[in-house]
């Protein structure tokens, strides 16, 4: 029996599969315990990330998710766009505050994601007055190549909410968007890079 790939399961759960792929996945899951268990683990991960905006997943859960998504880095057949899952390698929320330093207001959150030789630097500034955020970033490669005029999307609850493009030095911006749990994707010629949970609910 040929098992479903991680990509098959993700597309099925996100509603991105074609009618034929959806039917094939549904039929396979009805008879394959191994793939059903994998799909259930995915569902648990997604639910745990979405049900509480203040919830920070345990380190082992994050690592499990990263390991699980590694097969997505493979080239997809049929000429479809390759998909890359970016890993979070730096987050200012995880850094200890300097001794004696006082904070006035909520400081911007800085995150650095990496997918292969591409880095995506993201800064999120929260505006408590109107319950919105401003998200700015830059897409760079390890050889300092800039990705200009590159599509960037913000998605929440399975729907693309906002779209923009990078400027000549790979910078992009989403100004004063409502607080929500967002995934960010960058469409490069080499494939689509996805940054999961660049912002979680009201955090």
Image: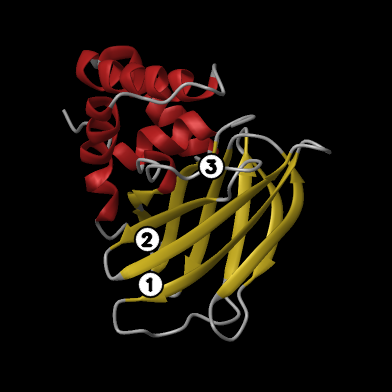
Front residue of 13/20: it is: 13
| Residue identified by numbered label 2 | 82
Of helix, strand and loop, which one carries label 1? loop
CA separation in Å, label 3 and label 2: 45 Å
| Residue identified by numbered label 3 | 102
Residue 39 drawn at (x, y percent): 34, 22
In the depicted structure, whether residue 145 falls above or below residue 80:
below
Residue 56 drawn at (x, y percent): 42, 26
CB under 8 Å between discs 2 and 1: yes
Residue 77 drawn at (x, y percent): 31, 58
Counting other residues with Cα less than 10 Å from the Cα at mark 2, is it few (<14), some (14-19), or many (20 or more)? some
Quadrant the C terminus occupies: top right
Upstream in sequence: badge 2 or badge 1: 2
Residue 7 drawn at (x, y percent): 35, 42
Of helix, strand and loop, which one carries label 2? loop
**Based on the displayed image, in which of its 4 quarters is residue 175 positioned?**
bottom right
| Residue identified by numbered label 1 | 190
CA separation in Å, label 2 and label 1: 7 Å
Counting other residues with Cα less than 10 Å from the Cα at mark 1, is it few (<14), some (14-19), or many (20 or more)? few
Q: Residue furthest front?
A: 100
Counting other residues with Cα less than 10 Å from the Cα at mark 3, is it few (<14), some (14-19), or many (20 or more)? few
Closer mark to the observer between disc 3 and disc 2: 3
């Amino acid at each position: 029996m040929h098992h479903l790939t991680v990509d098959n399961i993700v597309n099925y759960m996100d509603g991105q599969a074609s009618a034929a792929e959806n039917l094939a996945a549904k039929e396979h899951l009805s008879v394959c315990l191994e793939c059903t268990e994998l799909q259930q683990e995915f569902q648990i991960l997604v639910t745990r990330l979405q049900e509480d905006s203040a919830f920070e997943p345990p380190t082992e859960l994050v690592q499990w998710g990263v390991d699980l998504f590694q097969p997505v880095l493979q080239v997809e057949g049929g000429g479809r766009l390759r998909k890359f899952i970016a890993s979070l390698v730096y987050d200012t929320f995880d850094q200890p505050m300097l001794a004696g330093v006082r904070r006035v207001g909520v400081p911007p959150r800085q995150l650095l994601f990496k997918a292969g030789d591409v880095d995506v630097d993201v800064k999120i500034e929260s505006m408590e007055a109107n319950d919105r955020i401003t998200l700015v970033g830059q897409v760079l490669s390890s050889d300092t190549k800039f990705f200009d005029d590159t599509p960037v999307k913000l998605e929440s609850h399975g729907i693309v909410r906002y779209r923009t493009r990078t400027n000549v030095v790979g910078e992009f911006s989403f100004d004063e968007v409502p607080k929500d749990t967002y995934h960010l994707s960058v469409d490069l010629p080499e494939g689509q890079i996805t940054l999961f949970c660049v912002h979680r609910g009201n955090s």
